[in-house]
Image: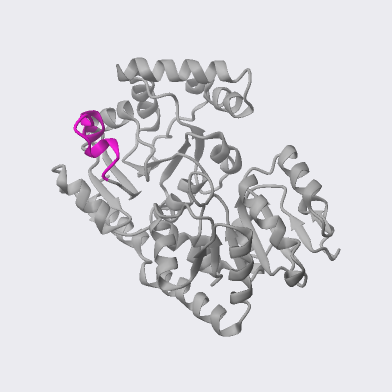
Amino acid sequence: MYELAIRLLTAGLWTAQLFSSKARLWAKGRKNWRNRLTSTPLGRQPVLWMHVASLGEFEQGRPILEGFRKQYPSSWVVLSFFSPSGYEVRKNYSEADVVCYLPADTRQNARDFVDRVRPDVVIFVKYDLWANYLFELRQRGILTLLIAALFRPTQPFFRPWGKLWRQMLGCFSHIFTQDVASAELVRCIGLKAVTAAGDTRIDRVLQLAQDHILLERPPLRADVIAGSTWPADEDLLLPVIHAPELAHLHWILAPHEPSARAIRRLTKLLQRSWALYSQWDGQQIVEVLIIDSVGLLGRLYRYARFAYVGGGFGRGIHNTLEPAAYGLPVLFGPKYKHFEEARQFVQRGGAFPVRSSAELLQAIQRLEQPDEYERASIAVRQFLYENRGASVQILQFLTKNLLF
């Protein structure tokens, strides 16, 4: 039944390419994949295959991948993506020898993919798990890790009908979770090879903040950066951007999906001077700088004092760790309860959930007071420093257990 479901899903995505640009990229990236996938050259060892769903999971796995490459200079690294939004941004990532789409999870694809890659160790990041690949890896006795995992009791792994999902978790040689609660859930279903290591994203964002790699055209001035915003976030933000009380503030707006349509909508509603980053000369003074490309947000936080993180009026907020690494107090919408770092930031006084433009205005005015700003900035930094080090634990485990 699982195999049938995968084949139906694949057929649906191939059909959807007639209507969806993302589906077209998904299908095109997997077409004739056997002829396009570079097999691991003989003599390159050890071989690491890391699989991620998209860009966010890539950033979680990146400290491990780069640490592995540094530790084993002669290694061969394969990085696979499920989503076009991740692959298209990182397809030229220099630290991997091969960057590719993960073929659809059929038994034959799984066998052929593993035959070509010949991995010594496989790492799945967070949640993008595929049964046929995992069963194939277990059958071959390949060291397989799940890292940065987060679990909740409502997930299929812990439900009476979730046998297949529990079998998938049982394929991992070791599971590294982001928190103790997740590790306890895994132990409750009889799996003992689990460690609450923390979130590898923390190591990544701290590294990014310490790299001091500046943008070629840095913003001349920015007070508030709104990152990964959706229309619902922008409807909240626009009255605040236009508020007379905050007319002295300069803004950076970075939509989550900066399509031409999304940018047109935003610019049509703006009543302050603005420029698109792609057309900005680096010198023009504007009140709102709109980021109309992807891949810059993690470094843009360096140039602001406050951060608003989008997604809190939809399925959930986006990455709050990136602005926190620069000591920025964080604001976001009300849907943040499933994100441990956001809950910690709120509890410690470093982040502020808002439900309306009026609440956002009040929060920014409060943070403009130096004492309030300093307390919030220290709170987010302190959480990151207390919880760093997950990458070191995982790399030490690999050193101890990887035989080649």
The residue at the point 28 percent across, 55 percent down is 399
The residue at the point 35 percent across, 35 percent down is 129
Left or right relative to 373: residue 67: left
Q: Nearer the viewer, residue 237 or 16?
A: 237
Left or right relative to 191: residue 247: right
Q: Position of residue 300 (x, y in %)?
A: 65, 61
What are the residue bounds of the magenta stretch? 153-167
The residue at the point 29 percent across, 41 percent down is 154
Q: Position of residue 114 (x, y in %)?
A: 35, 29
The residue at the point 54 percent across, 40 percent down is 86
Left or right relative to 168: residue 77: right
Q: Where the C terminus falls, by quadrant?
A: top left
Q: Where the N terminus falls, by quadrant?
A: top left
**Residue 189, relative to residue 309: is it above or below?**
above
**Residue 112, relative to residue 217: is it above or below?**
above
Q: Nearer the viewer, residue 298 or 211?
A: 298
Q: What scheme was used to colour the molecule? A: one colour
Q: Position of residue 327 (x, y in %)?
A: 54, 72
**Residue 77, relative to residue 301: is it above or below?**
above
Q: Quadrant of residue 167?
A: top left
Taking the magenta stretch, the answer to whether it contains residue 166 is: yes
Residue farthest to the left, as pictured: 190
Q: Quadrant of residue 173?
A: top left
Q: Is residue 230 visible?
A: no
Q: Position of residue 303 (x, y in %)?
A: 67, 68
Taking the magenta stretch, the answer to whether it contains residue 12 is: no
